Image: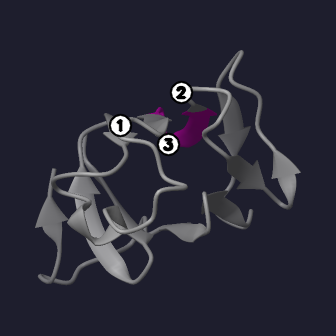
Amino acid sequence: MAFYFKLNDKIFKGPNKITIGRGAPFDHLDEDRSIARTHCSLIMKKNEYFIKPLSEDAVVTINNKQVSVKKYKRFALSDEVYVGSYKLDLLPNYEGKDYTVI
């Protein structure tokens, strides 16, 4: 099952598990060296969302608390999630046509 999310004003449609990092389709992150090539993993499972940084240098925060690389951390739609300095918003009811497919 696919889901939609926004990362720094760009909307994506992804499969239930994706890796966010520099490079396609996240070309808009290429200039920011604080984002690793494989920065974090994002999973949707049974309408729940989980995120995990993929290295010690990859900063992911939920409500201003840094997420550990040791395990996936569940988060809710109401949580404030950042991948590096980029805000990540989940869009469960998105019906638009302006998005990039992963």
**Residue identifier under label 1:** 19
Q: Is the C-beta separation of discs 3 and 2 under 8 Å?
A: no
Residues 3 and 72: in front is 72
**Residue identifier under label 2:** 54
Residue mark closest to the camera, 3 vs 2? 2
Q: How is the image coloured?
A: one colour
- Secondary structure of the residue carrying tag 3 is loop
Q: Amino acid at mark 1?
A: Thr
Name the residue located 58 percent from the left edge and 36 percent from the top edge: 50
Residue 16, compared with residue 4, is above or below; it is above
Mark 3, other Cα within 10 Å: few <14 / some 14–19 / many ≥20:
few
In the rendered image, residue 78 lying in the magenta stretch gets the answer no
- Secondary structure of the residue carrying tag 2 is loop
Disc ID at residue 47: 3
Q: Quadrant of the N terminus?
A: top left
Disc with the residue nearer the chain's start (3 vs 2)? 3
Q: Amino acid at mark 2?
A: Leu
Q: Marks 3 and 2, how far apart in space?
A: 22 Å
Name the residue located 26 percent from the left edge and 60 percent from the top edge: 26
Residue 36, compared with residue 4, is above or below; it is above
Residue 52, compared with residue 75, is above or below; it is above
Q: Which residues are magenta?
A: 45-52
